[in-house]
Image (cartoon, helix red, strand yellow):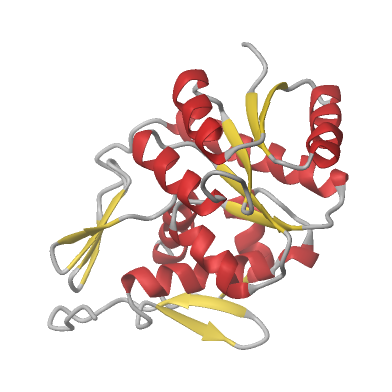
Amino acid sequence: MSAALILIVEDEPTIAGAISRRLAAEGYRIQTVGDGLDAVSAAASLLPDLVLLDVMLPGIDGLEVCRRVQADRPVPVMMLTARDDETDKLIGLGVGADDYMTKPFSMRELVARIKALLRRVERAKELGTPTADDPAIVTGDLVIDRASRRVTRSGQEVHLTPTEFDLLVFLAESPHAVLTREKLLEHVWDWSETSVTRTVDSHIKAIRRKLGADLIRTVHGVGYAFEPLREDEPGE
């Protein structure tokens, strides 16, 4: 099996070079572009296994790049942002990013999170299509179809990123159970670094924004619980 191809989209040559060298040393194949429009073209032609995407880019910004790339072909996207702004992160997650890191960041953490994201993608491929033993999860007007990895509410399909879908399924498989942020990180992200639990919070907010705030209950200081809907409970 050939090494994973990572497309690095970063307009700062110093940062792009440092990331490229580190990831190449880890055994990955690397392609680097510094412009938003070039990134969309490169993603379409190269079919990378993962896109490492800066938010601030010439041409079109990283959010628009992410929209176009995900519309063309589902691919794991990790966004890099220079601002520790929750709104920016939620927008990034909303357009299809799977994870984000705020500059400046540790190269060690970047590598670890890239490896974890690629492992999750590979694990999903190995599991294949769910069988009859894995039926769709139906609660109220919400349908989570594990076979097709699609979610509908009130009959309308809602686009979730791969990470959001995996997080929703893991919560929904244990209704009412309170799952800690650490447990969610370990299972969904395959990542045990407890200092990044805000990643979980941001993804939960993105799911609530797309599907409604009534699905997932916050247990302050602990984690989250999935709350099944009543049959007559309308979507928001």
Viewer-proximal residue, 202 or 221?
Answer: 202
Viewer-proximal residue, 47 or 222?
Answer: 47
Viewer-proximal residue, 196 or 20?
Answer: 20
**Residue 47 location in percent, x, y?**
49, 23
In the rendered image, the vertical position of residue 164 relative to residue 220, given as above or below:
above
Where does the N terminus fall, quadrant-wise?
Answer: top right
Residue at 53 percent across and 25 percent down: it is 42
Indicate the quadrant where residue 219 lies.
bottom right
Residue at 48 percent across and 76 percent down: it is 225
Answer with left or right where residue 98 lies relative to residue 25. left
Residue at 50 percent across and 52 percent down: it is 163
Answer with left or right where residue 207 lies relative to residue 58. left
Give the total number of marks visible in the rendering: 0
Indicate the quadrant where residue 58 lies.
top right
**Residue 168 location in percent, x, y?**
43, 61
In the rendered image, the vertical position of residue 157 relative to residue 39, given as above or below:
below
**Residue 54 location in percent, x, y?**
65, 48
Answer with left or right where residue 155 lies relative to residue 151. left
In the rendered image, the vertical position of residue 199 relative to residue 106, given as above or below:
below
Where does the C terminus fall, quadrant-wise?
Answer: bottom left
Indicate the quadrant where residue 182 lies.
bottom right
Residue at 70 percent across and 40 percent down: it is 10
Residue lying at the far front of the rendered structure: 59
**Residue 139 location in percent, x, y?**
24, 70
Answer with left or right where residue 6 lies relative to residue 132. right
